[in-house]
Amino acid sequence: MRPLFRILTIAALVAALPGLAAAQDDDAALKIAEPDFTVISLPTSLRLPKFGSAFRVTHRFQRTLGEGDFGDLAGDLFGLDNGAVIGLEYRFGIVPNGQIGFHRSSRLKTIEFFGQYGMLRQERAGLDLSVIATVEGVDNFKESRSPALGAIIGRTVGDVAAFYIEPMWVNNANPLPSQLVDDNDTVSVGLGARVRIRPTVYISGEFVPRVAGYDPDVSHGGFAIEKRAGGHLFQINFTNSFATTPAQTVRGGTGSKDWYLGFYISRKFF
Amino acid sequence: MRRYIGTFTFVTLLCLSAVGCDEKLSDIAGPSTPDLEPSFTSIQQLIFETPETGGRKNCTACHHNVGRTPAGGLNLLHDVAYDNLVNVASAAKAGAVRVVPGSADASYIVHKVEGRPGIAGARMPLNGPYLSDGQILILKRWIDLGAPRN
């Protein structure tokens, strides 16, 4: 339980640091170009107001869309008949600009704990910069723990678009012991974008190339269409992996022709 | 200034949180050979010379020259095993090399313990039980590392 203890310690220390309680912009206000805390798997630099929270449920249906002909695909309701990798996520604003949360994915019973802190704001620095730290483990956090550190560099363009560059280092990305592999870590640079095409409709996409270290199969990527409705965001996505956590993301997709349908719902509580 | 001190502290703590996770090699090696490592000494001792409680015979039960000709012409007793394996041609299959340093896939010993198509004779150990996937993975890693005499 050491990584969990570390994360909880960090959360407690952050909450206790008066220096972090800097003047806060109105983070409860809707940012039209940045309506959610994730693109698909990549986090965004959207901030939670202090004591605000958000919930997200993810589904990745396990049927590859390219399997069989269109009739087969329609017969399986585009994968809905084949079960899904389901994720539940909750995040909470513990200090101004700082949030913590957890994500539970049914894929290998993975639990991820994360903390994110917004360091720079676009209004003052020209770019949004957040740091993020996560640790995840499979079998309900009992095994194969993978911590990760990264930065989220974001920029919105008016109310129209948001772009992200996210360098990330994931330790223990390789599921084999380090004695048996050349690389146990992965460095990736996630690229994400969201474009508003109608007043409440967006298209988004992300690609996470691995630039160093362990890089099996193909890099994770996906695109989505989204509808914002009040505090909700509904997303239909198409991805080449089941990844919803950093370690899963850098492990990549299952194959260049394997694409899966997904459906997310997120809800803000502030 | 206080804000930046806090931020620096936060980032430092995050870095400290991310030090050193890894899988256990013993989980891959399995319960009967938990100490198996990708080194020649370890493989010699725990795979070649020691039978397992699960029934797997030690290789040296047949591959020795005490009062007999080693099976397949391969003597795996510890004083000579390395020199009989690394960069040595198989006596049973023309063109095959028992251990090709740096290439587990090209090494005939891997073909034999995995029971790949095209091997001469039977999969090893003869009639099983065979090496586990984890044990084979460790053997292959030693070869991929250059099959050092370690």
Image (cartoon, rainbow, N blue to C red):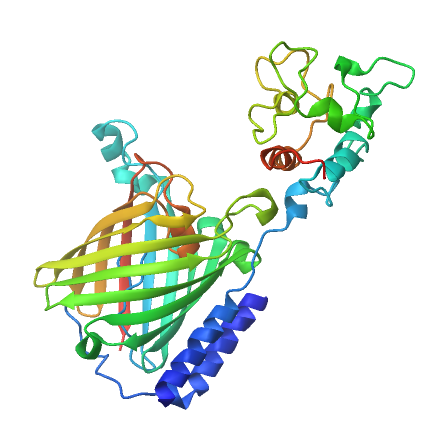
Residue at 37 percent across and 43 percent down: it is: A83
> Looking at the image, can residue A33 be seen?
no
Say which quadrant the N terminus of chain A sits in. bottom right
Above or below residue A63? Residue B105 is above
Residue at 62 percent across and 9 percent down: it is: B94
Left or right, residue A223 beside residue A176: left
Residue A156: give x, y in percent of width and height. Answer: 16, 67
Residue at 41 percent across and 79 percent down: it is: B8
Furthest residue toward right:
B67
- Across the whole image, how many numbered discs are drawn on residues? 0
Residue B142: give x, y in percent of width and height. Answer: 64, 36
Q: In terms of image quadrants, where is residue B39? A: top right
Q: Nearer the viewer, residue A122 or B24?
A: A122
Above or below residue B102? Residue B89 is above
Residue at 52 percent across and 77 percent down: it is: A9
Q: Nearer the viewer, residue B47 or A40?
A: B47
Q: Nearer the viewer, residue A217 or B44?
A: B44
> Looking at the image, can residue B132 be seen?
yes
Q: In terms of image quadrants, where is residue A231? A: bottom left
Above or below residue B72? Residue A224 is below
Left or right, residue A241 beside residue B99: left
Above or below residue A104? Residue B106 is above
Left or right, residue A25 beside residue A97: left
Residue A152: give x, y in percent of width and height. Answer: 30, 65
Say which quadrant the C terminus of chain A sits in. bottom left
Q: Nearer the viewer, residue A249 or A94?
A: A249
Residue A12: give x, y in percent of width and height. Answer: 48, 81
